[in-house]
Image (spheres, rainbow, N blue to C red):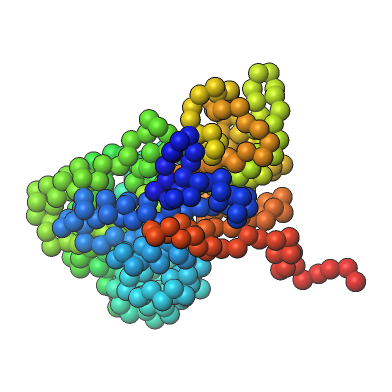
Amino acid sequence: MIAIRDCKLYIGMYPASRIAEQYGTPVYVYDEDTIIERVKEVKYSIDGVVSRIYYSLKANPNPYIAWLLYSEGLGLEAVSPGELYLAHRLGVDPSRVMFTGNSTSIEDLYYAVRLGVEINVDSASSAKKLCRLGYRGEVGIRVNPLFGAGYHKYTITGGHGSKFGVAPSQVGSVASLLRECGISVKRLHAHVGSGIADPGLYVEVFEFLYGLARDIGSVEELDIGGGFAVPYKPTDKRFPWRRFGEMLRQAIEDLGAENYEVIVEPGRYFVAEAGVLLARVADVKEDHGVIIVGTNTGINHLIRPALYNAYHEVIIADNACVRNVTLADVVGNVCESSDVLARGRLIPQPREGDIIAILNAGAYAMSMASNYNMRPLPSEIVVTRDNKIIVTRRRQVYEDLVRDYTWWPK
């Protein structure tokens, strides 16, 4: 597990600073034990209530992690052809892969059809494209329930004006359109946002989908999406899975909805706390009493603070006890004013060469990373349950940054 012992950060049995010295920085480090513990927690809490759990690949598509979760009995949820390709390359059973695209092209849908995966349509246009492809089978419809929630306005995916899903008033006509070309609607799906700690909202989504499903008739599955809250700040609430299981069970009994299979799609919840981004302090300076700690990483490797004003705990790996602290901003090496990873934090006085650990970097870190400023992407390693270290992605080199350009001066 990831823990602080004797004022040092450990990942499994390894001091984080030793990992950084051996494998270089910046580097994403994932702890397999933490992922497995999160899976056990979720499975135990909703056993007998939720029929299937899918891992949302967009959170972290690392092949080792995807295969680990699949091996634990989860399906894989994809939002792009690239994620579908990953699942296919891993050898995942297509019946355990679900594709929920948006602004979906006919080429995207053709690829999903060719692979034989489960499909959710996001619009009447997508339904028509499936008909044009000659698809015959079963699909789901993603519905916008016209309400949503999330920790930032950019993470709310349901409500008026949202780009996601079919409006409730149009679900019946989309279902009819599909039936006319030989496609049965077996699933209704909704995803209303991310960072949601209130289990009652998911019960509300279930009840909403149940009401629509009765009118369609052919529906067998109700997919209430993902977005379950992870505690990033010390004061944040963890999603109460056991309470959720109890509330959902009661709602199913009250509605008489036992004949429906319930699906959830956590992504972040399984992997966020399992990831640490290790970087090195490259520069230390002071501005009006605030220490500015420059690192050899940045928003190109962790864009969440700039994109969502997201909070990530930052510690000095070999001096992780909170004492003799100073006020500091932790910044990156990207040429952008928004390249601030943590602002106004109390940390021990940093020195050049120290290893900085950015916690909860297992979700939406590497998956959203870029080569902005022509900076190479870090390597990714996994500390396994038996305390082996596996390099699952090599660090990019400068040659990788220009490899795909086809023109050079002669």
Vertical placement of residue 360 versus 30, above or below: above
Count of number-bearing discs: 0
- 324 with respect to 209 (left or right): right
Tell me the quarter of the picture where residue 204 sits: top left
- 31 with respect to 209 (left or right): right
Tell me the quarter of the picture where residue 332 sits: top right
Vertical placement of residue 69 versus 93, above or below: above
Q: Position of residue 115 (x, y in %)?
A: 42, 78
Tell me the quarter of the picture where residue 237 sits: top left
Q: Tell me the residue at 47%/66% (across/down).
A: 63
Q: Tell me the residue at 59%/58% (across/down).
A: 379
Q: Residue furthest right?
A: 410
Q: Is residue 229 visible?
A: yes
Q: Position of residue 365 (x, y in %)?
A: 52, 50
- 21 with respect to 176 (left or right): right
Q: Tell me the residue at 68%/36% (across/down).
A: 352
Please name whichever residue, 387 or 127, is drawn nearer the observer in this view of the structure: 387
Q: Residue furthest front?
A: 6
Q: Is residue 181 visible?
A: no
Vertical placement of residue 174 versus 248, above or below: below
Please name whichever residue, 49 or 279, is drawn nearer the observer in this view of the structure: 279
Q: Position of residue 125 (x, y in %)?
A: 43, 65
Please name whichever residue, 313 or 241, is drawn nearer the observer in this view of the structure: 313
Q: Quadrant of the C terminus?
A: bottom right
Q: Position of residue 126 (x, y in %)?
A: 42, 67
Q: Tell me the residue at 37%/78% (across/down).
A: 116
